[in-house]
Image (cartoon, rainbow, N blue to C red):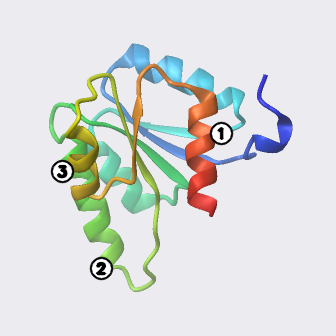
């Protein structure tokens, strides 16, 4: 059980994931953490949602059709730089296939952290805490 003081109430999460089963499982897990979850089925949808709404954090799958997580993250960072009021939204890469060079590639493409599937609530909270420091 996660301690109540570690749960960030009403955290707005953009989940960018093309796999429907992963979307459902992640939504359930994030809801248990009292997160408000918006789902995009690919990177392009994720970018479009990002343009319309404000999120506290983005969980970004790497390999998706239409626009992958790397390209979507670069586009989100470009949008942040071009806005009149620059903001920073943490992007956590979320993938089942982690290789030694994946983390470096994620950083180079504007992501802030690499998290392995399956979803681990404790790890997610640990990562969020690291952004607050």
Q: How would you rate the neighbour count of disc 1 (Cα within 10 Å): few for under 14, some for 14-19, many for 20 or more?
A: many
Query: For the view shown, which residue lies furthest in the right direction?
Result: 4
**Tags 3 and 1 touching, CB below 8 Å:** no
Q: As drawn, is 126 to the left or to the right of 58?
A: right
Q: Which residue is more in the foreground, 75 or 96?
A: 96
SS for tag 1?
loop
Quadrant of res 40: top left
SS for tag 2?
helix
Name which residue lies at 15% across and 37% down.
66
In 3D space, how far apart are the residues under numbered discs 3 and 2 (Cα atoms)?
17 Å
In 3D space, how far apart are the residues under numbered discs 3 and 1 (Cα atoms)?
25 Å
Query: For the view shown, which residue lies furthest in the front direction?
Result: 100
Which residue in the protein does label 3 denote? Answer: 71
**Tags 3 and 2 touching, CB below 8 Å:** no
Residue 126 makes an appearance in the image: yes
Is the residue 28 above or below the residue 12 in the image? above
Is the residue 64 above or below the residue 112 in the image? above
Upstream in sequence: badge 2 or badge 1: 1
SS for tag 3?
helix
Residue 44 makes an appearance in the image: no
Which residue in the protein does label 1 denote? Answer: 35
Name which residue lies at 72% across and 36% down.
34
Upstream in sequence: badge 3 or badge 1: 1
Quadrant of res 32: top right
Q: Which residue is more in the foreground, 76 or 39?
A: 76
Numbered badge on residue 82: 2
Name which residue lies at 45% across and 83% down.
85
**x and y percentages locating residue 19 in the rendered image:** 33, 20
């Amino acid at each position: 059980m996660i301690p109540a003081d570690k749960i960030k109430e009403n955290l707005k999460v953009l989940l960018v994931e093309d796999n429907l089963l992963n979307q459902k499982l992640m939504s359930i897990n994030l809801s248990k953490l009292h997160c408000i979850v918006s789902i995009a089925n690919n990177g392009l949808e994720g970018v479009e949602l990002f343009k319309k709404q404000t999120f506290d954090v983005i969980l970004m799958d790497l390999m998706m059709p239409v626009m992958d997580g790397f390209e979507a993250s670069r586009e989100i960072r470009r949008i942040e730089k071009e806005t009149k009021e620059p903001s920073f939204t943490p992007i956590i890469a979320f993938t089942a296939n982690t290789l030694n060079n994946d983390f470096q590639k994620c950083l180079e493409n504007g992501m802030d952290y690499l998290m392995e599937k399956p979803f681990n609530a404790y790890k997610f909270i640990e990562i969020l805490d690291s952004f607050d420091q």
